[in-house]
Image (cartoon, rainbow, N blue to C red):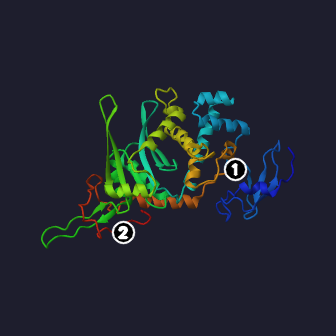
């Protein structure tokens, strides 16, 4: 290695990790310069930010941070996680200890979720499919994987692991609404919790006028706004578990308006959740603890969640999708949704700098808190009713801030 000061163009991919710096998380602006080559072997470069005089290692915020593993071994670890190799197999292939694999999974999962939280904001999504999948942990534990998939781009907007409850469904819907520019079309299975969750997040208050002067005043209730379109695909199974009947119903928006919106947003003319079913097939094939009749079950929820999030990050930015190909040009879901302009290599993913932004985290937490508070806080979750036909025109109140 030649220990000289490299050209300034080499530092365009680095950014300042200091949250108080005006150039925080802004690479390519020329404020990062060479500082020194510290250490015994002189193989890790130290950089300096000219805006705040903060010194930091070139590995800070990457998968190489605080690691003694060589770059080729770290890339091999990422490839093993991408192809769903079990932990013992990964340790054998990469010639590392099993604890090293677990530590790498923990660091990579936290970095993947942090990067997703900070990058996926104000995206254009015409339609979203929501669904939940059953997964098993040791000893005899059950964890449901809740996923929101963007139609047209195959981009995973959010993935969460938790119980199959209405609160979890509302949190999933709120994550989608908080990260898109306009409320998209929602498609789900026949689980009733999604209807109440959508009303909780984007519902508006409807106050019916009392007819006459005698009697009690009608209580206000939550109704769906005019721009909300939601349909369900209900599957009926026999005792053996085989699908014998599939029915489709439009819950919010009306059948004619819903089909019209599908055509306007170029999402086809059929109400279906095939994209989500295909994603769960990919997920179960590339995550060892999720395979059928596997012996590689997870022992803890954090490790189980970390494996899923690492694959989600690789699926969005590293793995090209065949249905997104344009001619001979391969594309990833992140390219289709407009978050990047090229397919990331494994080396680029390893050296990607991810720094936690407290300001963005606080803004997203506040927006999520506003979305999860329904317009009627005293409205029981099980008594939400749909308004009669013809009564919602010109009587719906304005929605909550940032709810739409």
Mark positioned earlier in the residue sequence (2 or 1): 1
In screen coordinates, is 41 left or right of 144? right
Mark 1 lies on a secondary structure that is: loop
> How much space separates mark 2 and mark 1, taking CA atoms?
46 Å
Q: Quadrant of residue 357?
A: bottom right
The relative height of residue 76 versus residue 327 in the rendered view (above or below) is above
Q: What percent of the width, then of the height, locates residue 280?
A: 47, 39
The relative height of residue 211 versus residue 122 in the rendered view (above or below) is below
Q: What percent of the width, then of the height, locates residue 249?
A: 31, 49
Say which residue label 1 marks: 60
On the question of residue 382 being in view, the answer is yes
| 374, 311: nearer the viewer | 311
The relative height of residue 335 versus residue 290 in the rendered view (above or below) is below
On the question of residue 145 being in view, the answer is no
Would you call the spot at circle 2 few (<14 residues within 10 Å), some (14-19), or many (20 or more)? some
Say which residue label 2 marks: 398
Which residue is painted at 87% across and 51% down in the image? 4
Q: Nearer the viewer, mark 2 or mark 1?
A: 2
Which residue is painted at 65% across and 34% down in the image? 100
- Placement of the N terminus among the 4 image quadrants: top right
Q: Tell me, for residue 169, which label it has, or none.
A: none
In screen coordinates, is 384 left or right of 89? left
């Amino acid at each position: 290695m030649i220990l000289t000061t490299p050209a300034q163009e080499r530092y365009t991919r680095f950014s300042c990790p200091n949250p108080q710096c005006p150039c925080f998380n802004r690479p390519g602006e020329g404020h990062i310069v060479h500082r020194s080559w510290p250490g015994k072997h002189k193989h890790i470069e130290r950089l300096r930010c000219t805006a705040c005089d903060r010194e930091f290692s070139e590995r800070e915020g990457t998968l190489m941070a605080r690691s003694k593993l060589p770059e080729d071994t770290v890339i091999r670890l990422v490839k093993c996680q991408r192809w769903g190799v079990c932990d013992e197999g990964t340790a054998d292939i990469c010639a590392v200890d099993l604890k090293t694999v677990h530590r790498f999974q923990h660091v990579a999962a936290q970095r993947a979720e942090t990067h997703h939280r900070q990058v996926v904001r104000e995206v254009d999504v015409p339609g979203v499919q929501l669904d939940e999948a059953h997964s098993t942990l040791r000893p005899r534990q059950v964890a449901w994987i809740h996923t929101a998939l963007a139609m047209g781009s195959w981009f995973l907007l959010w993935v969460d692991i938790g119980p199959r409850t209405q609160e979890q469904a509302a949190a999933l819907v709120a994550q989608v609404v908080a990260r898109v520019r306009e409320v998209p079309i929602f498609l789900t299975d026949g689980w009733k919790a999604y209807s109440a969750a959508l009303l909780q997040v984007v519902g508006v208050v409807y106050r019916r006028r009392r007819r006459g002067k005698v009697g009690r005043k009608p209580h206000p209730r939550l109704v769906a706004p005019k721009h909300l379109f939601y349909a369900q695909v209900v599957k009926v199974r026999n005792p053996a578990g085989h699908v014998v009947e599939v029915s489709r119903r439009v819950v919010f928006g009306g059948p004619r308006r819903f089909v019209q919106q599908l055509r306007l947003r170029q999402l086809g003319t059929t109400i279906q959740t095939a994209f989500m079913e295909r994603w769960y097939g990919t997920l179960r094939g590339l995550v060892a603890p999720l395979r059928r009749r596997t012996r590689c079950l997870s022992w803890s929820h954090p490790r189980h969640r970390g494996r899923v999030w690492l694959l989600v990050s690789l699926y969005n930015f590293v793995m090209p999708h065949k249905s997104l190909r344009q001619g001979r040009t391969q594309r990833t879901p992140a390219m289709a949704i407009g978050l990047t302009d090229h397919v990331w290599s494994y080396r680029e993913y390893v050296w990607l700098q991810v720094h936690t932004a407290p300001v963005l985290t606080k803004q997203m937490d506040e927006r999520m808190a506003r979305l999860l508070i329904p317009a009627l806080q005293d409205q029981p979750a099980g008594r939400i009713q749909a308004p009669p036909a013809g009564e919602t025109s010109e009587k719906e109140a304005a929605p909550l801030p940032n709810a739409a």
